[in-house]
Amino acid sequence: MKFKNLLLGTFALLSFNSLSTYAQTPAKFTRADTLRGMLTPLRTCYDVGYYHLDVKFNIADKSISGSNLIRFKAMSDFTRLQFDLFDNLKIERIIYKGKELPYQREFNAVFVNFPQTVKKGSIDEIKVYYSGNPRVAKKAPWDGGVVYTTDSLGKPWVATACQGLGASVWWPNKDHQSDEPDSMLISISVPSGLKDISNGRLRKVTKLKDGYTRYDWFVSNPINNYDVAANIGNYVHFGDSYNGEKGKLTLDYWVLPEHLEKAKKQFGENVKPMLQAFEHWFGPYPFYEDGYKLVESPHLGMEHQSAVAYGNKFQNGYLGTDRSQTGWGLKWDFIIIHESGHEWFGNNITSKDIADTWIHEGFTTYSESLFTESRWGKQAGQEYVHGQRRIIRNDAPIISHYNVNEDPTGDVYDKGANLLNMVRTIINDDEKWRSILRGLNKEFYHQTVTTEQVVGYINKQAGVPLLKVFDQYLHYKNIPTLEFREQAGKMYARWIADVDDFDMPVRVRVKGGEYQIIKPTTTSREIKVEGLTKENLQVDTFNFYIGVLVE
């Protein structure tokens, strides 16, 4: 994802919901925000099963033209539905059973009227023909749209990147993360002499009569809309394979010819160690059927499913820097590790609403620490994630407003990662923690989810109560403060937090001694650690992201 700076028991669900009070500053949202972000009956009435996107790129005038077949199952009786396409793109016609359908447009939403009721349970389809000049991305991937540039040899180099902004910036679809097609055919026509690299596996290359070549890529797994990508350029290919948990995984690399040798070295040093680490921690790579690809891009990078966009200039770190400032981040290629981590969290497990982006970014940023740990030991991984705290702003709750497609705070990355590392410390059983991470990817395999589902699963499997911990760190911008005071030779402690009756175990020690677990609440209680005074008190703030106040 772009960087700012960078089924559960009813009781568990109700418990978490009752704790979440959304202490956010009121925000103003528009009708356009609601149309984009809300699941209205005009969206929930149909479930997309298949797309066939067939688009021609006219690079000379930065225009596209083509169609998208939308095959769906009716989830209720309806005569009207909504799909999405940015209003600067023209709809040529919408075809249903050989005839044109009437439609209305409002902002970037398109409302289609059917001549008769589409019956619940039926499988049906429409085909949308469209054209125009999609928004040009000025600074992808931080903004969205289509990138038009040239490579070092002066040849065209084009790519799409649209997370947050939405895939409807360049193709018509139900632009909501809650609905993914089960499979998809992506047909991209480009001027002959160039190649298109998209998601999935290449099925066919067809030379057209108008000086264009069409590349047909088939995705056999569910895919979220913003992951669908076109990468157009003078690409060359090299490949490899990885013997993983589900067998032989094909590794395909597409880069500009002038970078071929650099790519062979950089990809060779990073990809297989990444796959080994992440399959250990998260379970099998989720898309063996579609393979794994890295595609050189004219922007920094994006987690495009089975076709990860790579623009880190074949160097370690994040454009040659270490976001953690610990030194560990310079030992591996940030974009390869981070964006590939999204294959598990973001692509395999996808949040239904963009407000829950921490499910994508918190876990994936945490995966950087686990990768570091897999290569250089646990202490190295802990140092790395701790170093990321320097980027946290605590400017807003991690979870933003639902149903309005609001881009959340950048704290979804590093604060999310530190929250997860803290949960691991609380559980205090690394094998159990690993089983939870693998269990998430198995329980929610190829699914769209909510925060309540993810947190509920972790809470149930952990064996320790974690709902209030997640509530504080996800729904409030402040971190809790552990307050100590000494009175009559005794030490007392309590939590100062936004969540009512907040409790979280934490580790303390007499300076130089062994850490002991204490269980403070929001009520001041005596801490029974022999010999503890306010002068020799040490709190494990290395693993616990908290404030400490000693009076």
Image (cartoon, rainbow, N blue to C red):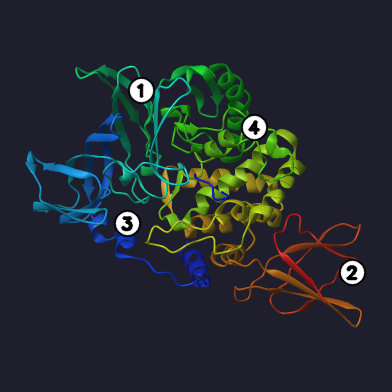
| The C terminus lies in quadrant | bottom right
Q: Nearer the viewer, mark 1 or mark 4?
A: 4
- Which numbered marker is on residue 316? 4
Q: Is residue 306 above or below residue 202?
A: below
Residue 350 shown left or right of residue 340 in the figure: left
Front-most of residues 352 and 446: 352
Determine which of the numbered discs, if any, sits on residue 174 in the image.
none
**Residue at mark 1 to residue at mark 4: CA–CA distance:** 30 Å
Q: Amino acid at mark 4?
A: Asn
Q: Residues within 10 Å of mark 3 (few under 14, many from 20)?
A: many
In terms of sequence position, does the residue under pointer 1 or pointer 4 come before the other? 1
Estimate how packed mark 4 is, as few (under 14), some (14 to 19) or many (20 or more) residues with alpha carbons within 10 Å: many
- In this rendering, the answer to whether 312 lies above or below 267 is below
The percent coordinates of residue 106 (x first, y second) are 22, 58
- At mark 2, the secondary structure is loop
Q: Which residue is mark 2?
A: 532
Q: For the point 37% across and 61% down, which residue is it?
A: 404
Q: Residue at x 75, y 41 (%)?
A: 380
Circle 3 sits on which residue?
36
Give the residue number, with chain letter if any, for mark 1: 202
- Where is residue 145 shown, x and y percent of the image? 37, 42
